[in-house]
Amino acid sequence: MDCAIQFDDVSVHYGGKTALRQITLAIPERQIFGIIGPANSGKTTLLKCINRTLEFTPAARISGKVVVAGRDVSGFRNVYELRRRVGMVFPLPVGLPLTIYENVAYAPRRAGMHDRSELDALVEQCLRSAMLWDEVSDRLEMLGTRLSGGQQQRLTLARALSHRPEILCLDEFSIAIDPITTMKIEDVLLELKERITIVLVTNLVQQARRLADRTAFLSDSRLIEEGETEMIFTHPANRLTGRYVNGEFG
Amino acid sequence: MNGPPETKSAEKEYTVRWSAAAAEASYPSLAAAFTAVMQHETDCLRDGAASLPPWEITCHLPSRAATPSTRPKYVYHVNARAGGSGGEGTEESPWWGLATAVEQLTLLDKVGQIKLRAGQTVRLAHHEVFTATSIERWKKVKENIARFVFLGMALALIVPMAAILTYLVVQAWPALSFSFLVQNPQHYMTAGGIWAPLVGTFWLVWISLLIAAPVGVLAGVYLNEYARNNWCTRIINLAVVNLAGVPSIVHALFGVGAFVMFAGMGRSLLAASCTLAVMTLPVIITSTREALSAVPIAFREACWNLGATRWQTIRTIVLPNSISGILTGVILQVSRAAGETAPILFTGAVFFSTLPEHGIRAFFPYGLGDRCMALSMHLFTLATQVRDVSPGLQYGTAVVLIGLVLAVNSLSIGLRVYLRSRKRW
């Protein structure tokens, strides 16, 4: 079992506030890796370390080593390639002020794909994976920003898939999506994990249990426990984990 | 629960007064009064007669008539038509139904919450559902005051503007004609038109714009999109802000030093345009930055997450959505440059020069090294330096200058409306 992402003693501070404390964690390849934990426990920060988007927060300081595909991310000269290898979906959906088609075709175009038929096929495939195709196939020229919140969230998912990432990071991807569509997307994720690594941050503990092969529990910027999802849910080593997954706190 | 001494005293009487009817009756205690009220209301309801609060119950000595004080000591509210129970008896939350009201009042009396001395009154008022409470009425008054103050201020802006324009146009009317625009000043500027200064202003503004707009917009993009927040950026920002506040006469003197003398341009169209460019630059930078920072940061982060470079993000997302603001800022500076006198006074404007009035030379009369006339300068000259000039000529020049500025501003407003209608979010 190879490791897609490895955190080696990673700490992150925002100014005087600590967001992550000495996280050491290995995320295996071609699996769904669940990350659960109460608010403000550092889940999103952990994702931002992977594709170095933490750099957009000026006050953030990171120490330790994050290894993606065998390479230390801080050593990537071409950070844009790193970001193309990692698809990101954040909880607040941001439809770019472009048409739906251009939203999905954005990353491939920036990466140099210009053949129209190739783009058409890719856009359709991504929108189908995100369960949005049936709703928007007849109005691809509409502005992405005009879609509803849940549709925009699926649009960001389609966009994250559009650059054919090797790692897909989902941060609360389903908060604005209805349960039935969420289930369909979850099925797609289970298919996708044959090819790519998925990191799933979720507040829905049961979603982690349904999907994740392994799960990590974060609390108060520390990694409390990490292991096989079934073990985490049935025989947690830490009392805090047990109470969290059983809904007794958090 | 012991009642207060006042209510114990047997000498007191409680008179119930219905507002609608003249009926009055006296009872030995508050509880008795409440019971009587309830009985009366029940009778009224059974008979189908309308009987609604307010009632007032006044405490008085038996020897004297009940003279209710003007302000009741206690005021409670009831929504008499409503059924059910609940409410707090306040105006915001009246009791639901008379039965509730009487029940609650009796309870309040029992625990000693209602203490009446002789001459004091307890009042139960009717409050319809969904009608304004006193707080809401006061809110409404304040709302109206605020609106009329703001409206007044807005109107106060229009009045002087309209007055000035009307006065100018009326005064200039005799002089305004097409030939006024296309003739050169004649007879030591006491006759003729304004062709030479008009063309001069046109070229001054265009050349200054060609210099200032690219530099200003690109610098604004750099400062807003690329520059890190370090001491160097902060110094540049400080310089830009201060430069925007420098009086135009100081810009003029700087122009003399830098362009006329140091750069060896001499007093010329080019030197004057450069001076105007320096004057407009900081505002163009600032308005560009404002326009760029109005584009949400989330769009940029979404693009960066997709592996787009900064330039790709700027070209595809940021600029298309901020171009209206950027252009508006630039165009407003055009009108400012057209109206300024001081910066061109020492750097390239002349009192008088004759130009060809016909042919292609009429439109390109000045070389970059020539001195030129300008409208603002011409107006100043006409108003202060020339004798026996007809007022029509002065006012005509002013009208053309103001008209030019208004036209440019309207253009910018139109452009902004058009581009905003195409905005993508």
Image: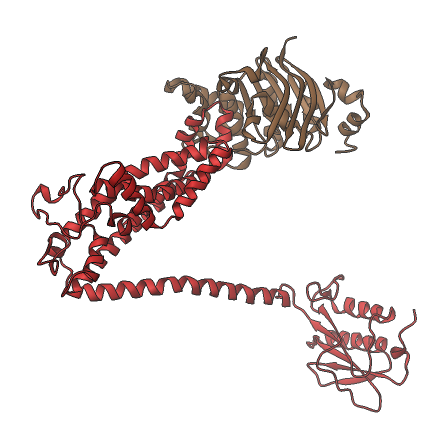
What x and y, as percent, mark residue B357?
8, 48
**View extreme (top): residue:** A1
Note whether residue A139 is visible. Answer: no
The image shows residue A247, relative to residue B333, as above or below, that is: above
Would you identify the image quadrant in which residue A174 lies? top right
The residue closer to the viewer here, B196 or B86, is B196
What x and y, as percent, mark residue B327?
34, 41
Would you identify the image quadrant in which residue B63 lies? bottom right
The image shows residue B73, relative to residue B292, as above or below, that is: below
Would you identify the image quadrant in which residue B208 lies? top left
**View extreme (bottom): residue:** B63
- Residue at image point 82% right, 73% down: B114
What x and y, as percent, mark residue A62?
62, 24
- Residue at image point 51% right, 65% down: B144
Query: What chain is the brown one?
Result: A
Q: Tell me the colour chain B is drawn in.
A: red
In this rendering, position of residue A224 left or right of residue B329: right
